[in-house]
């Protein structure tokens, strides 16, 4: 059996790669009705301004705990 020369091997591998690439690619565009995007719905965001929150001097031994649900300061032991 005849062996392939380096040029023939290169041409054969390059051709195989190109053929595989062309055949494996598909169209990215899909015009089917299922592919049409639906409009995005949004929800109203409620914002609250926090007032009367203690903002005294900071030190490593004290911390202020705040309940985000009730909007009030809570004691450290709870």
Image (cartoon, rainbow, N blue to C red):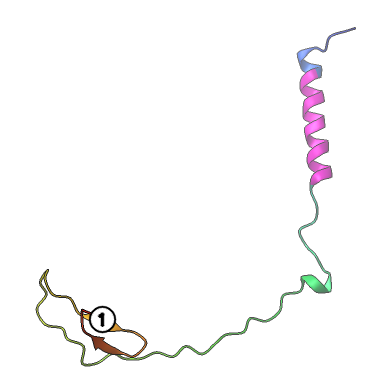
Q: Majority secondary structure of the magenta segment?
A: helix
Q: Is residue 72 magenta?
A: no
Instruction: Please tell me whether residue 12 is drawn above or below residue 32 in the rendered image.
Output: above
Residue that appears at 77% across and 29% down: 14
Q: Nearer the viewer, residue 65 or 32?
A: 65
Q: Residue furthest right?
A: 1
Left or right: where does residue 7 sit relative to residue 63? Answer: right
Quadrant in which residue 13 is drawn: top right
Left or right: where does residue 27 sit relative to residue 53? Answer: right
Residue that appears at 36% across and 91% down: 48
State the quadrant of the C terminus: bottom left
Q: Is residue 11 magenta?
A: yes
Residue that appears at 81% across and 38% down: 20
Give SS at disc 1. Answer: loop
State the quadrant of the N terminus: top right
Q: Residue furthest front?
A: 77
Instruction: Please tell me whether residue 47 is drawn above or below residue 23 in the rendered image.
Output: below
Q: Residue furthest top?
A: 1
Left or right: where does residue 2 sit relative to residue 71? Answer: right
Instruction: Give the image location of residue 8, x and y in percent.
Output: 81, 18
Residue, disc 1: 78
**Callout 1 environment at 10 Å: few (<14), some (14 to 19), or many (20+)?**
few
Left or right: where does residue 4 sit relative to residue 52? Answer: right
Q: Nearer the viewer, residue 27 or 39?
A: 39
Quadrant in which residue 3 is drawn: top right
What range is drawn magenta here?
9-24
Instruction: Give the image location of residue 62, x and y in percent.
Output: 13, 75
């Amino acid at each position: 059996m005849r062996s392939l020369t380096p040029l023939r091997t290169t041409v054969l591998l390059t051709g195989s790669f190109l053929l595989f690439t062309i055949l494996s690619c598909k169209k990215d565009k899909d015009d089917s009705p299922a592919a049409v995007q639906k409009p995005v719905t949004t929800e109203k965001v409620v914002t609250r301004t926090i007032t009367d929150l203690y903002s005294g001097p900071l030190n490593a031994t004290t911390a202020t705990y705040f309940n985000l649900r009730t909007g009030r300061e809570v004691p450290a032991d709870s």
